[in-house]
Amino acid sequence: MSESEPSMPANLYPAADEWQAVDRYFTSTLVGEDDALITARASGAETSMPNAEVSANQGAFLGLLAQMVGARRVLEFGTLAGYSTIWFARSVGEDGRVVTLELEADNAVIAETNFRTAAVADRIDTIVGPAAESVARLIDEGTEPFDLVFIDADKPSNSVYLAAALELTRSGAVIVIDNVVRNGAVADADSTDLRVQGVRQVVNDLASNPELDATALQTVGEKGWDGLIIARRR
Ligand code: SAM
């Protein structure tokens, strides 16, 4: 739901304008981004993946989900400008912790500025480098388990990140995986898009793991047609 997709052909998605209008309506009525979130979103333009953050409605959903499960510790794969990170940091509260993993040092600098603006920098650890390596270190160090994991980095590595998430969580933990519909391409078993195959592989992993309950939700809105998986450890 957050990754920038190729622009949608207008004739294929004639309702795209309406999806965006509905997003704007709910954002303006229910969500109410404050200045810090607006600044974080705008700063995404300076990152390596402009416009790839979650929408305001999606950020609010993630924040609410974290609150609903009483998450005190959140692990995020893929920081970008820290937009979704701020939603999580606000949800975990003053005593909570968010660990966010980002490949690009320049993105992390932008994100950390946004964390200070949002007054949540003291509850966020940003780890720069390939997330597979960062998370392997967290496992080696015996890091305290996380209550919620948000997987939103390079899609071909989804399976690696799920396996790491399982090392770093315990019963009751929630795992959310973003961008799993990809304009419908996920249903194409023969897709040559490695991001699509990354989603299909992690779906297989989830489906074959008796420890996990999972479902997927399709979404439309200002980010086009996409969706997310929500899984929970039994
Ligand atoms: N979660 C962010 C939000 O909603 O505000 C958006 C994250 S964006 C979709 C994906 C991010 O993952 C980018 O910042 C990208 O640099 C990062 N990324 C890509 N490959 C990575 C890797 N191997 N390790 C860590 N981060 C990676």
Image: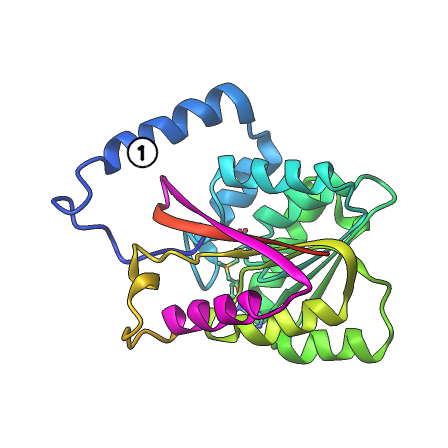
Closest to the observer, 73 or 190: 190
Ligand 1 is within 8 Å of the C-beta of the residue at disc 1: no
**Can residue 205 be seen in this snapshot?**
yes
Looking at the picture, how far across and down is residue 70, in whole percent? 78, 41
**What kind of element bears circle 1?**
helix
Residue at the image point whose x is 49% and y is 66% from the top: 203
Residue at the image point whose x is 33% and y is 33% from the top: 20
Looking at the picture, how far across and down is residue 91, in whole percent? 73, 39
Decide whether residue 36 is among the magenta residues.
no
Residue at the image point whose x is 47% and y is 41% from the top: 55
Residue at the image point whose x is 49% and y is 70% from the top: 204
Closest to the observer, 124 or 179: 179
Q: Is residue 11 above or below residue 177?
A: above
Looking at the picture, how far across and down is residue 102, in whole percent? 61, 67
Looking at the picture, how far across and down is residue 67, in whole percent? 72, 37
Q: What kind of residue is marked 1?
A: Trp
The residue wearing badge 1 is 19
In this view, the residue farthest toward the left is 11
Closest to the observer, 141 or 128: 141
Quadrant for residue 231, please give it.
bottom right
The stretch of residues the image draws in magenta is 195-223
Residues packed near mark 1 inside 10 Å, few (<14), some (14 to 19) or many (20 plus): some
Q: Is residue 232 above or below residue 41?
A: below
- Is residue 219 rendered to the left or right of residue 10? right
Quadrant for residue 190, please give it.
bottom left
